[in-house]
Image (cartoon, rainbow, N blue to C red):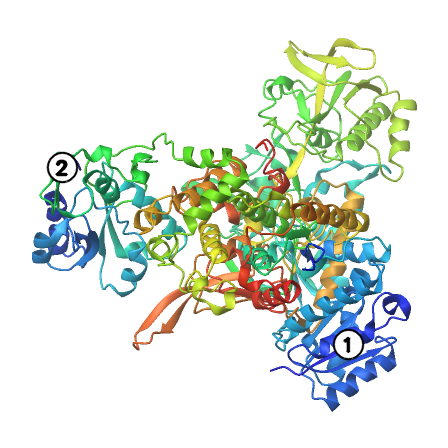
Amino acid sequence: MQVKEYKPLIVAFCCNWCSYAGADLAGNNRLNYPADVKIIRVPCSCRVNPTFVLRAFQRGADGVILCGCHPGDCHYTSGNYYTRRRMALLFSMLDYLGIERERTRVEWVSAAEGAKFAATMNDFAEKVAALGENKRLEDLRCKK
Amino acid sequence: MQRIGVFVCWCGTNIAGTVDVVAVAEALKKEPGVVFSANYQYMCSQAGQDLIKAAVKEHNLTGIVVCSCSPRMHEATFRKTAAAAGLNPYMVEIANIREQCSWVHKDVPTGTEKAIILGKAAVAKVNLNVPLTPGESPVTKRALVIGGGIAGIQTALDIADAGFEVDIVEKKPTIGGKMAQLDKTFPTLDCAACILTPKMVDVAQNEKIRIFSYSEVTEVKGFVGNFDVTIKKKARYVKEELCTGCGACTEKCPMKKVPNDFNLNMDTKRAIYIPFAQAVPKVATIDADYCNMLKNGKCGVCSKVCAAGAIDYTQKDEFISEKYGAIVVATGFNPISMDKFDEFAYNQSKDVITSLEFERLTNAAGPTAGKLLRPSDGKHPEKIVFVQCVGSRCDACNEKGKEYCSKICCMYTAKHAMLTRDKYPDTDVTVFYIDVRTPGKNFDEFYRRAVEEYGVHYIKGMVGKVIPDGEKLIVQASDLIAGKQLKIDADLVVLAAAIEPDKSARPLATMLTASMDTNDFFTEAHPKLRPVESPTAGVFLSGACQGPKDIPETVAQAGAAASKVIGLLAKDKLTGNPCVAQSNEMMCNGCSTCERVCPYGAITYEDKEFRMPDRSTLIRRVASVNPAVCQGCGCCTVACPSGAMDLKGFASEQIIAEVDAICK
Amino acid sequence: MQKINRNVLVEKAVSLLENGTVCCVLGWKKGEFDYDITPAVFTTKEDIEANFVFDDFCGANFSKYLVQKTRKAEGKILVFLKSCDTYSFNQLLTEHRFDREKVYAVGIPCEGMVDINKIRAISGEGISSVECGEKITVNTIYDEKFEINASDVLLERCESCKSKLHVAYDELIGEEGEVLESNRFDEVAKLEAMTPDERFAFWQSELSKCIRCNACRDVCPACTCEKCVFDNPKSGVENKAPANEFEEKMFHIIRAFHVAGRCTDCGECSRVCPQHIPLHLLNRKFIKDINEFYGDYQAGAEVGSRAPLANYTTGDIEPSEVFDGRGE
């Protein structure tokens, strides 16, 4: 049997104003990060419903990361503060259920932090890859 | 079912170098809904756009996916292309295969694989896109300025200058604000009244400007372009239209013991008064707390002496409703109360005063006619100590002061010290400071002149205690540079009290749904890029209500706020962002959670009648979003427990479809 | 046993009904079995006198019923509220879920309600009758008789009762209690102290028992949505039955998250779960985290308070700092 090389699948939700622009800047500066990271653009990190995070895991994601403007710099003034509370509680709950902590992350990346974006994604992808496949929040029916 | 066209851009070799664009176009052709796919060197070029337009016509496309550079780059371009081809511009989605794919990945198989997945996500989203139309709302071409200090005056003049009507609401009987109380202004030392009063006259004479003095805003409804405001004109018991401001009444009024707030209660005025000679409007006002006629019906002198017949003891508060397109907040500041600062003996000794009181003591129109005399005994003070940072730059845990720097104190104290030494060279002047902050044009030069030319003693260190001792005040302080404790006596101690936003700001912010920081300063829409706008659309900030400011900064901000207002009022219609939140009334619980998290006050609740399946009617409280106010962050969509709130253009279904496409 | 006699409540209900203050009464009545006490709406004096029950099995929290009942009622509804119920009552008022004017709330004292499963553990299956007196007398079909102290078989939520204080009522029967020192977070802390593998094993085994009967959702006073996300095909989480392990977890995580900051910890979910899943441990985890991260907050303690997830401070803890100091 041929063993397929394990590559983690990472979903990154990026706010339109800071982090998505930060990702663009990483591109402009040709800063590498794994192709396993796929970005979904949302207007603000506060648009990310915990449902989306769980949905990603259900469908086979191995890690989910949210990126938003730095606290205090939200384009909508307060969106990321709500994100911070929601995700702090959600991630704590996932941990409580025994889901690996390194599979979820929130990172604040400004539009000027292309390097931080790339570094964050490299680090996150590495940590997720070290954990291996997500087996604790998977839906077997969604497996390829 | 959508008919989607996929257009893969090479971007020269920018994309095509690491992504097999042909393979991407081929792969995406197989996605549900895709009826056409193509690739081209430069999609954003005229030829590329024409290719898109032709394909829309030929294949009856209902949606477009462009696999190209970042949407931040060309989303607007391709939306216009779609519109030109007769499609709704919001039926376009961009898959970012340049910045987030070809530029960050090195080998072609990886790049191609990822580009296909990103394309699939965009296709999945477009499949659920619906045409969106930006809402339009009319603009009432009139502005309201709340506060008639120099900030409000400058804003009103600038707006009126552009040809728009402006109303100023000022809670005091006259406009002018704090600047009218000042003596000289730093760093040029021109007299405040000489530069302010002509502007006040300009306001009075400008046909476009109406002044509601002795008035307050009591209610604000509506939204950008369409505010409905209720203004309370407090009864001043004088008919404004008849009063000539001759002042006969203010001379004859027998009630002489009314504290004069304009002079910070350092002298008295009559129960009927005009705050100062250059007041605008120059109309008398009766202080109902002191007027004998109003209190017990015994007097009526002012009515007898008024040749114009302007006195009206039966006047009532009057409520005026007016429509505005824009609102400028210019509520200004006040020095903080010194009640909590017992160590400086402010309440124990009349000779411990605040800087604003000192300002009145040196003002020619002040209680001492400009002679610097001690409030306690009217003697010339020979030794004056100025204390900086009283209540400013305090620790967060210190409950009596403010954490922030009040910004203006270093400069006005240098001014006070310099003017004192200039007028009374025999006076010994000492300033205690933590730091001297002089970042402004000609500011540091000014401060150095005070030290070098005028011989003001600057001592780095805080004053710990002021002890009244007979006629003298003993000042205990530390000299941080010499490293010793000082005990010096003074005849007058002047405290540079921190400044704080006016108390009227907080209730006003609630009315306007404008946000404030923990210090009650209004928050700007963006601290760097939108410094004169409130996050609430149509509400603008002018002057110290946004943060401590000196006069030149205030005037600059006032002008900036005015230009933003003019930009708004110049429009006949406002076109909104169509990607706004929308509430499904059938699912809404009416719980108010979304209302609480909305930073713009875009969500309101109303009781709505629903027809039930059994033909009965049910009245339920449901949320409704004002699309003209909503900025589309989507915070409410997650706060909503039932999922009744969704965001157009970024609907939950669409984002989930993207997640699924990526994770497939 | 309960300090307050059923007859006191019956008298109160009848007098309020007869003098026209209320048009109907939300109370308890016997179900199929003695221990199977269910909520009921009474509209006549006769019905109340004959069927109204108040004993150690009256765990049901009526607050949620007010959402639907007040919509249709012509007059006021009389509702009896135990101290824990009053928090749910206030929380629903905060969320504008019913019209306060249409309710006449009577606060009643409670000595803790009992858990039939704990009784079963003593008596075994086959309970034929139960009588609540000084002690609970249990008879089985095998002609066995057990006398059990109510305090030995209390519901988990009553063992760790958080408050005997009534935070809302129009009228209070009996003496007012106070907020209690509760050990209700001990179990959560125990789980937190486990390794992730142990925690996962624990929850995997608990949640796999779920049959998706929706009893927890249907009884929950915070779950009053006009349409539940689990019934909405567009929500992305719709499902009717747990087809696999993921969906069991998904349902319970989302449900707990939806009520986070709004859950008063009334414990109804665990009480009604036919599979005996300790669902309150999910809700309490959120409450414990909220208290630790953002300061103590008790949902429903006052009407109009701002739920922690609809609030923030600029210095809030970062999601990355949540695990700091929690070892591993």
Q: Quadrant of residue B630?
A: bottom right
Residue in the picture at 71% in, 64% down: B207
Q: How many marks?
A: 2
Q: Residue at x 90, y 28 (%)?
A: B449
**Residue C202 drawn at (x, y percent):** 45, 42
The outermost residue toward the bottom is B58
Separation of disc 1 and disc 2 at Cα?
77 Å
Location of mark 2 (residue): C146
Q: Nearer the viewer, mark 1 or mark 2?
A: 2
Element at label 2:
strand
Q: Position of C296 compared to B495: left or right?
A: left
Q: Chain of mark 1?
A: B
- Res B18 quadrant in image: bottom right
User: Picture coordinates of residue C211 (x, y %)?
Assistant: 37, 57
Tell me if residue B297 comes above or below residue B106 in the rendering: above
The spot of residue B539 in percent (x, y) is: 65, 57
Residue type highlighted by circle 2: Phe
**In this rendering, does residue C261 appear at all?**
no
Quick one: label 2, few (<14), some, or many (20+) residues within 10 Å? Answer: some
A46 on left or right of C166 = right
- Is residue B255 at all visible to an observer of this figure? yes
Q: Nearer the viewer, residue B12 or B195?
A: B12
Compared with residue B180, is residue B656 higher up or lower down, i.e. above or below?
Answer: below
Along the viewing direction, whichever of A38 and A49 lies nearer the viewer = A38
Which of C314 and B451 lies nearest the eye of the viewer?
C314
Instruction: Using the image, determine if residue C272 lies above or below residue B429.
Output: below
Chain of the residue where label 2 is placed in the rendered structure: C
Residue B25, disc: 1
The C terminus of chain B is located in which quarter?
bottom right
- On the same chain: label 1 and label 2? no
Quarter of the picture containing the N terminus of chain B is bottom right
The amino acid at mark 1 is Ala
